[in-house]
Image: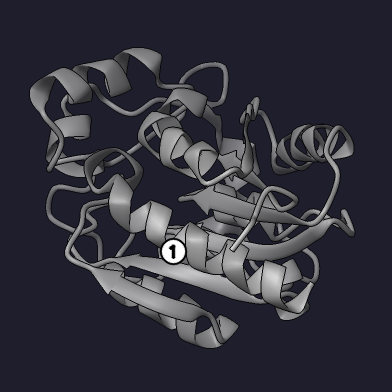
Amino acid sequence: MPTHHVGVVLVHGAWADGSSWTKVIGPLKADGVEVVAAPLPLTSLADDVAALDRVLERLDGPIVLVGHAYAGAVIGATRDPKAAGLVYVAALAPDEGETVGDVFHRGRPHPRTPKLQPDSHGLVWLPEDSFAEAFAQHAAPEEQAVLAAVQRPIAAAGIGAPVGRPLWKDRPSWFLIAEQDRMIDPDTQRFMAERMGAHARPHPVDHAPLVTAPHQVVDIVRDAVRDVVTTG
């Protein structure tokens, strides 16, 4: 089925950048899909939504938004009418009035989840060893080293901002549940997916399947694109 008129915008989470989508971009472009990785400043939730909106301004619709981890809150906060479907990849999906921190801390942390504190600038960095311990434990050491080297810190203030009515209440959504996630409790992911009424796909993957199991991410994004093509 031709999908060239459906765009996909990939949105990275905290402690990552657009390069985290490297293994996902190629297969989607091979399908004839226009793909853009949106860069987030991670300075506040409002700043990040504004950055996403600037990317969406440059594209024609319809668009499938794909958010990893923290970026689930970002893709749910856009009001761009071109957004036709939402894909959550081991992501956080706060409901109206909730914060990212509310859903992140909802479940019991994994024993290897890092204890994080902001630095003197209000920025939270992920310790380098946490990329192997919790962020992407299934990745090769070389991949973990790259993830640590390119990480972007997130402002602590962004995690505490309540969100408005999330877009997933008005658009179809998909949720890749990472069953071996050590950053976001898999039970919390299941709770959010069920609350959203999302098409849920559980997989035995870590927090960063876009790096460690990209075929699973590509498959769920393809499903969303096909749905937008069929119903659009």
Q: Which residue is mark 1?
A: 220
Q: Position of residue 229 (x, y in %)?
A: 70, 68
Quadrant containing the C terminus in the rendered view: bottom right
Q: Quadrant of residue 197?
A: bottom right
Q: Position of residue 160 (x, y in %)?
A: 62, 51
State whether residue 27 is above or below residue 111. Answer: above
State whether residue 39 is above or below residue 205. Answer: above
Camera-side residue of 81 and 119: 81
**Furthest-front residue in this view:** 1
**Furthest-top residue in this view:** 149
Please indicate whether residue 37 sits to the left or right of residue 6 in the image. Answer: left
Q: Position of residue 172 (x, y in %)?
A: 66, 76
- As helix, strand or loop, the secondary structure at mark 1 comes to helix
Residue at 28 percent of width and 41 percent of height: 115
Residue at 53 percent of width and 31 percent of height: 154
Q: Amino acid at mark 1?
A: Ile
Res 5 seen here: yes
Local crowd at mark 1 within 10 Å, few (<14), some, or many (≥20)? many
Q: Position of residue 47 (x, y in %)?
A: 77, 34
Residue at 73 percent of width and 79 percent of height: 169
Residue at 64 percent of width and 30 percent of height: 40
Please indicate whether residue 40 sits to the left or right of residue 56 in the image. Answer: left
Camera-side residue of 14 and 226: 226
State whether residue 172 is above or below residue 79. Answer: below
Q: Quadrant of residue 38?
A: top right
Camera-side residue of 175 and 164: 175
State whether residue 195 is above or below residue 10. Answer: below
Quadrant containing the N terminus in the rendered view: bottom right
